[in-house]
Amino acid sequence: MTEVSGDELRAAYEAIQADELARARDILSAYLVDHPNDPDGWWLYAHAVSDASQGLKALETVIKLDPKYPNAQALIDEATAFDIEPAPSEPAKPIRSFAADQPKPSSAKPATVQVRSSGSRIPTWLVAVVVLLIVVAALALLLPRLGGEGEQAATAVADASETPGSVGVGGTDTVTPQVVETDTNTPATGEPTETLETATDAPTEMPTESPTEGPTEASGETPTESAASPTEEPSSAETAVSQIALVESTLSGFAVVPGSEVQVQTPLGNTAVADVCTDAGSLRSQIPDVITALGTAGSQIPDGVGGLAVRFVDCNANNALIRYVGISSDDARAFAAGEIDEAALRSRIAVIP
């Protein structure tokens, strides 16, 4: 790892050396809000994150800011080589070889400091990516023998690809859970799912029972079946609509670009995002106010939402992106419940590459 300067970068560096990655991320997230073009900050951030895709994006940002940054391109090439290299047919041997290369616990920290200073250490998330690729390859070989059916093999591989390591290097825009949901809704086994079948049963059963049975029976059964609908869990589409509506109402005091509210996948998880018009002169004062506004909506965030985010854009330059920041749902809920104050919330801003 390159030599660091400045109190904030030095504090983040020491936190990484002490394996306090969460504290290092908090320090660097706040630092990068004010210093988005500092390659040293992004280099430290790449070593502080545990998500493979987020670390790779941070390294790519380092290269964009300083194409000759020491060891940055080499580390990106190593990550790319691990992603492209085909997995062996017997996964046990590569796993043992990686375990043999790791230092003993008693000398782990000194070895980490020495290797990072030279820029040749392979981050732990890269090792996790390789191990995950081996597991996926093993599943691909075993499932056709065990399952025997194409649908079961496709579903198992899709489930395996949902893990963060698999999506990390391959790309963060993959929405594997939607593929699995589509497979389970097809009436292959004849067992109805709770969400879709109840919605279709309500209109089909009421007309058939009303004309065949007496008025007294129809009036007694109809409220019972319709009363079950409010207790059903909302579908993913309804959750997305509620997310977008929540962000739209929360940011009503800002210049939100009409129709920009979307639901996307970010390092925070399933995230509700909106575009807000600003300029370079107003950005520094607007970010804290927007983050506080998002935090006040913490008690209304539905389950399954990982975070809330805002893309600050220059509406006078074809909505060119200036800054992309957000907060996790857990931090927003903690702020809304009074567990953390406004200063603590703003210190946990996540800078999205």
Image: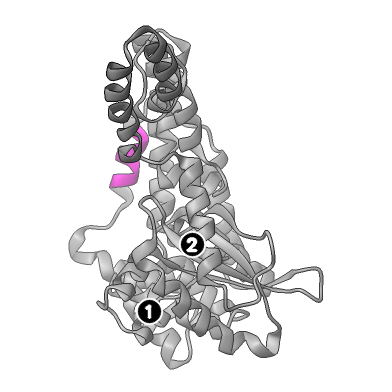
On the picture, is 43 further left or further right than 103?
right
Q: In the rendering, at what x and y percent does residue 83 appear?
A: 53, 43
Question: In this view of the protein, which residue sits in the foreground, 162 or 93?
Answer: 162
* Res. 54 mark: none
Name the amino acid, label 1: Leu
Q: Residue at x 32, y 19 (%)?
A: 218
Q: Which residue is mark 2?
A: 246
> How busy is the neighbourhood of tag 1: few (under 14 within 10 Å), some, or many (20 plus)?
some
Q: Residue furthest front?
A: 215
Rounded to the nearest angstrom, the CA distance separating label 2 from label 1 is: 19 Å
Q: In the rendering, at what x and y percent does residue 228 appear?
A: 30, 33
Q: Secondary structure at mark 2?
A: helix
Q: Residue at x 39, y 60 (%)?
A: 301
**Number of marks in the image?**
2
Q: Residue at x 40, y 81 (%)?
A: 347
Q: Residue at x 40, y 76 (%)?
A: 348
* Res. 345 mark: 1
The reply to whether residue 313 is in sight is: yes
Q: Is residue 41 depicted above or below 148 in this figure?
A: below
Question: Which contiguous range is marked in magenta?
Answer: 93-99
Q: Nearer the viewer, mark 2 or mark 1?
A: 2
Q: In the rendering, at what x and y percent does residue 210 appear?
A: 39, 15
Q: In the rendering, at what x and y percent does residue 179 appear?
A: 50, 31
On the picture, is 130 further left or further right than 63?
left
